[in-house]
Amino acid sequence: MMEHIYFSKEKNRLILLDQRLLPLKEEWFECQDTSDIVYALQTMVVRGAPAIGVTAAYGCVLAALESGSGKDWQDKLNRNLSLLASARPTAANLAWAVQVMQDLAGKAEFSSGPDLAGFWLEQALHLHEQDILINRAIGRQGRTVLEDGDSVMTHCNAGALATGGYGTALGVVRAAVEQGKDILVIANETRPFLQGARLTAYELLKDGIKVKVACDNACGLLMSKGLVNKVVVGADRIAANGDVANKIGTYGVALAAARHNIPFYVAAPFSTFDLETSSGDQIPIEDRTPDEVKYINKISIIPNEVEVFNLAFDITPAGLITGIITEKGIIEKPCQDSIRAIMAQP
Ligand code: MRU
C-alpha cells in the first residue's frame, strides 16, 4: 500500500494524497501551515480517525514553525494548536495527538517555534511509525476471528488510507490474507462521501485483496441470504462503556448483524478510546454540510429547497458488539471493566 501521508523536510510541508479525488485521480495536497491542515481535515483531503491523528501530529510541527521566534510565539502556537484540535469533533485521535505532542514537549525549554518544530518533527515521525505498528498488532489479534473462505462486511474505510498505514478493520483482513486465508471483503458504499465505494475498493484492489461493493441498503438482504460471515468496522471514538461512534450507517449494520447472528467486530487502537466520555450519547456527532448529500459530482440530486440530514457518525451500543479488537487483544462483550482492564495492562 502506497504511503499517503509524508512530511517533506526540504519543503517543510506535509504532503497528503487527496482522498477527495480517489479513485479517479491520484493527486497530492501540500500543507504549509495550520490553516492548510485544518482545511485538509475539514474537507476530508485526509480522513479516518488514526490518519487524522497522524496528520494533527505533523500539523503541530507546522504550527510551531509558523509561530516564529517573536516574544509571543507561544501564544501564537497555542492558538494554532486549539484550531488543530477542534478541526473535526468526533474522532478521538485528533485531540489525543495534539495532547501527546504537548505532553512530549513537556516542561523542556524551547527558544522559539522552529526550535520546538525540530523536536516535534522527530516525535511526529515516531507517532506515525507507531500507528502502523499498532495497526499490524490489531491485525494479528483480529485475524484469529476470520476463517478461510469468510465474506467480511465493512462500512466506510478503516484501511491504510484511514490510518498511518495498513489499517484497523482492513488491517485485520490484510493480516488474515497474509496468513493465506481466502477472504472476500464486502465494502458498503457509505453515502454520502462514499468512503467504501471509492477508498476501500481502491486500496484493496491495489493490494490484490478480493472486494465487492454493496449499496448501503443491500446490507439486510445480503445478511439474510447468508452472504456475510463477519462484520469488521473501525471506530472514531469509543466511550468508557464500550459504545462506539463510527461512520453513519454502522449502527444499522450492527442491528442487522444481531438479527442474523453474525459476529460484529470493531477494530481500533487505544488512541480511539475516550475514557472521559462515559457513554455513546455523550459523544459529539459531526453535522456536515448538506451539500455532500445534495450533490453528486456537483450535480444536484435533491430539490434545492428540501432540507437533508448529514450527521456524519452514529453510535453502536456496546451490547451489539461481539468484540473490540485492539493492539493488546480482543475485548469480548465490551464494558467499562473489560476496557479498563485491557488498557491498564503494561
Ligand atoms: O468521516 P471519516 O471518513 O473521517 O470517517 C471515518 C470512519 O468513520 C472510520 O470508520 C473510522 O475513522 C475508523 S478509521 C480506521
Image (spheres, helix red, strand yellow):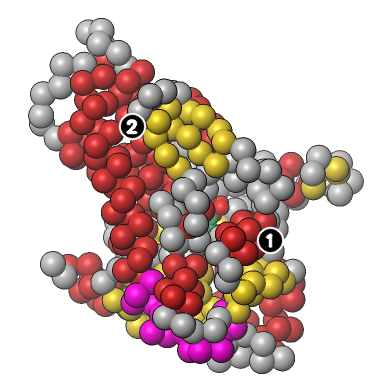
Whether disc 2's CB lies below 8 Å from ligand 1 is answered: no
Residue 31 is situated, as x and y percent measured from the top left of the image, at 48, 28
Tell me whether circle 2 and circle 1 mark residues in contact (CB < 8 Å): no
Residue that mark 2 sits on: 60
Q: Is residue 65 above or below residue 264?
A: above
Q: Which residues are magenta?
A: 139-156
Name the residue located 52 percent from the left edge and 48 percent from the top edge: 47
SS of the residue at dot 2?
helix
Name the residue located 62 percent from the left edge and 38 percent from the top edge: 27
Classed neighbour count for the residue bearing mark 1: other residues with Cα under 10 Å, few (<14), some (14–19), many (≥20):
many
Extreme-left residue of the structure: 108
Name the residue located 31 percent from the left edge and 68 percent from the top edge: 137
Q: CA distance from mark 2 to mark 1?
A: 32 Å
Q: Is residue 284 left or right of residue 122?
A: right
Q: Quadrant of residue 116?
A: top left
Q: Quadrant of residue 201?
A: bottom right
Q: Is residue 199 left or right of residue 165?
A: right
- Which residue is nearer to you in this view: 330 or 289? 330
Extreme-top residue of the structure: 70
Is residue 140 a member of the stretch shown in magenta? yes
- Which residue is nearer to you in this view: 209 or 279? 209
Does the rendering let one see residue 263? no
Q: Amino acid at mark 1?
A: Ala
Quarter of the picture holding the C terminus: bottom left
Number of disc labels: 2
Q: Mark 2 or mark 1, which has the lower sequence index?
A: 2
Is residue 305 a member of the stretch shown in magenta? no
Name the residue located 31 percent from the left edge and 62 percent from the top edge: 134
Classed neighbour count for the residue bearing mark 2: other residues with Cα under 10 Å, few (<14), some (14–19), many (≥20):
many
Residue 20 is situated, as x and y percent measured from the top left of the image, at 64, 43
The tag on residue 197 is: 1
